[in-house]
Image: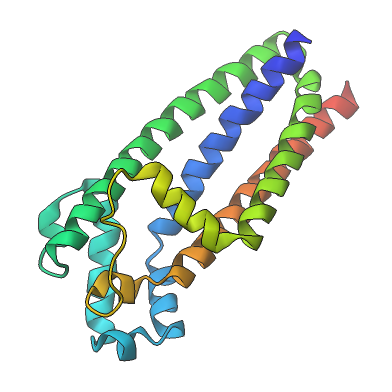
Amino acid sequence: MKTKFLGLLAGLAYLFLVLALGISLVSQWQGYYDFQFKKNATVQVTGLSMEDLHKRGKALRIYLEKGDDDLISPYFNQREVSHMEDVHGLFVLKNRVMVLAGLAFMGLFIYGHKKNFLRDYFTGNWILLLALIGFFAYIGMNFDQSFIRFHELFFDNDLWLLDPKTDVMIQMLPQVFFEQMAGLIGLFVLGMEGVYFFSLWKIKKRS
């Protein structure tokens, strides 16, 4: 029972690691921003050129990691900048979680390998994988509600309620932008979980 519990902890640490990594990769992928700008006809919606949209998208990407208001204040109003300060706080938390989860996973995996019970990690991860698939399926089917709930849970103000008539940020990044971003992150996480699950299955089979 102890080894199965350690396996579940390792699986949770791995999940948080790949989730944080997936958020980092997709949110820093400029090609995704440019693709969405073209797909959503953002030039027509905002009245900005594609070159200007690219610059603003790049500024947002860099801001997410650095948190320097000077990067985005030339492009967005004060309410938008204040909201991004809150978003940057979440990214700081994400980076800490990624480091801690990575260290926890490596420690548990090395410990399990040395004690020769990695095969027992397989059982707990069955449950975790099924729960994860169910979670992503729920979000996919109820994205509007999940999107609102996420903001209510992680933000203690209403700065995220931007006006699509006046605020360029929401014109550039409509809900569909985040819906498809969440889909990409979900596919990355499920793919990485599949690799981990298959690796544990191979270890269990050899044992």
Q: In the displayed structure, would residue 182 be above or below residue 201?
A: below
Q: Which residue is drawn at 44% across and 69% down?
A: 175
In front here: 185 or 29? 185
Q: How is the image coloured?
A: rainbow
Q: Is residue 81 above or below residue 86?
A: below
Provide residue 68's location: percent of width, then percent of height: 15, 50
- Count of marks overlaid on the render: 0
Find residue 58 and report its horizontal and vertical position in percent: 27, 66
- Residue 90 is drawn in which quadrant? top left
Residue in the picture at 44% in, 34% down = 98
Q: Nearer the viewer, residue 202 or 62?
A: 62
Q: Residue at position x 89%, y 28% from top?
A: 205
Q: In this view, does 168 lie above or below 89?
A: below
Report the quarter where the C terminus lies: top right
Residue 35 percent coordinates (x, y): 44, 77
Q: In this view, does 198 lie to the left or right of 166?
A: right
Location of residue 131 with respect to 100 vertically, above or below: below
Q: To which quarter of the image does residue 15 belong?
A: top right
The N terminus, quarter of image = top right
Q: Where is residue 206 in the image (x, y as percent from the top left)?
A: 88, 26
Q: Residue at x 14, y 66 (%)?
A: 77
